Image (spheres, helix red, strand yellow):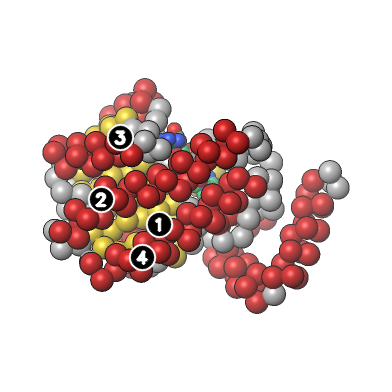
């Protein structure tokens, strides 16, 4: 998709990758960007820095996501691109059911609600694009967090399903699977085996994501090594588990 003159929504836009994407879209000639985030105060400041439309939204609430699309369409214009990026950090590591529910609501249902609210409207107008930010943890794993690993795997599977479902109706779908990006989410977070693959800036990640959007790629990787690991895992899953188990022991000092 050529983003010039397009109307976009970005969730999780008050921070990290979402803010960098909003900034890059506006700099790249988008007509307007509706910036959604749970943290309303911070969002207002960040949106006013770059000329985005601040729409405080909880993406785990379906009515709020519908209201977000309504507001973006009323104030900027019909939405061409919905980047569903909001996410919750795997730190501090928790395993309680409340945390599982919350991560599932944001990392999976947030994408479901975005697709339900935006895709039919895009299709009715002749097309559009959904971009779901998952993680390389959805292809591989986040070795410190079961809930992050499981919800990001679900996000990747959902994106694949959405891509197949909506392609014939003119709505293309991309999924973004970064390794480590330097953002408030990862600042101070222990290495989960990804630091050796390079920690890139949110602006660099946003640049690669916009290239993937321009090329209409389904799988957008900010770190090429993620694709290489994915292929190795598919080729020999037992060897992969063995290697990851050894790497985890090494990183955690045997804990
Ligand atoms: N930083 C990384 O290394 C990395 C790697 C892979 C994937 N990701 C994914 O990229 C996305 C962006 O992460 P980031 O690193 O920029 O993190 P971040 O913490 O800097 O930003 C995430 C934003 O999402 C918002 N958010 C959280 N819950 C929300 C909700 N219910 N409704 C609306 N907004 C909500 C937060 O307020 C925050 O502003 C996430 O989905 C994350 O899982 C990040």
Q: How crowded is mark 4: few (under 14 residues within 10 Å), some or many (20 or more)?
A: some
In which quadrant is the C terminus drawn? top right
Where residue 53 appears, as percent x and y from the top left, is 24, 34
Judging depth in this view, the residue of 103 and 135 nearest the camera is 103
Calculate the distance from the C-alpha at mark 3 to the C-alpha at mark 4: 24 Å
Residue furthest to the right in view is: 254
Calculate the distance from the C-alpha at mark 1 to the C-alpha at mark 4: 17 Å
Q: Nearer the viewer, mark 1 or mark 3?
A: 3
Mark 4 highlights which residue?
Answer: 163
For mark 1, give the secondary structure. Answer: helix
Pointer 3 and pointer 4: residues touching (CB < 8 Å)?
no
Chain-order first, disc 3 or disc 4: 3
Rendered residue at 15%/37% (across/down): 75
Check residue 111 in the rendering and tell me which mark sits there, or answer none. none
Rendered residue at 28%/32% (across/down): 55
For mark 4, give the secondary structure. Answer: helix
Q: Is mark 3 within 8 Å of ligand 1?
A: no
Judging depth in this view, the residue of 229 and 158 nearest the camera is 158
Q: How crowded is mark 2: few (under 14 residues within 10 Å), some or many (20 or more)?
A: many
Chain-order first, disc 2 or disc 3: 3
Check residue 118 in the rendering and tell me which mark sits there, or answer none. 2
Q: Can residue 208 be seen in this view?
A: no
Mark 3 highlights which residue?
Answer: 64
Give the answer, above or below, for where 184 lies relative to 41: below
Q: Is mark 4 within 8 Å of ligand 1?
A: no
For mark 2, give the secondary structure. Answer: helix
Where residue 156 appears, as percent x and y from the top left, is 48, 59
């Amino acid at each position: 998709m050529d983003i010039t003159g397009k109307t976009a929504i970005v969730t999780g836009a008050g921070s990290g990758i979402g803010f960098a994407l909003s900034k890059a879209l506006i700099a790249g000639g988008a007509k307007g960007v509706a910036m959604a985030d749970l943290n309303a105060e911070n969002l207002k400041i960040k949106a006013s820095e770059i000329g985005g439309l601040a729409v405080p939204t909880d993406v785990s609430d379906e009515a709020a996501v519908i209201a977000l699309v309504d507001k973006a369409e009323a104030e900027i214009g019909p939405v061409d691109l919905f980047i569903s990026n909001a996410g919750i950090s795997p730190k501090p590591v928790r395993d309680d059911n409340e945390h599982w529910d919350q991560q599932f609501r944001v990392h999976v249902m947030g994408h479901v609600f975005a697709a339900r609210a935006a895709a039919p409207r895009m299709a009715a107008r002749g097309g559009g694009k959904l971009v779901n930010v998952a993680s390389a943890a959805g292809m591989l794993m986040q070795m410190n967090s079961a809930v992050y690993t499981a919800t990001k795997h679900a996000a990747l599977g959902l994106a694949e399903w959405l891509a197949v479902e909506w392609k014939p109706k003119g709505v293309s779908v991309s999924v973004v699977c970064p390794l480590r990006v330097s953002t408030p989410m990862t600042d101070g977070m222990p290495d989960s085996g990804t630091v050796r693959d390079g920690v890139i800036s949110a602006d660099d990640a946003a640049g690669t994501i916009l290239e993937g959007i321009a090329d209409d790629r389904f799988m957008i990787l900010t770190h090429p090594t993620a694709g290489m690991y994915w292929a190795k895992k598919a080729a020999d899953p037992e060897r992969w588990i063995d290697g990851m188990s050894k790497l985890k022991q090494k990183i955690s000092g045997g804990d």
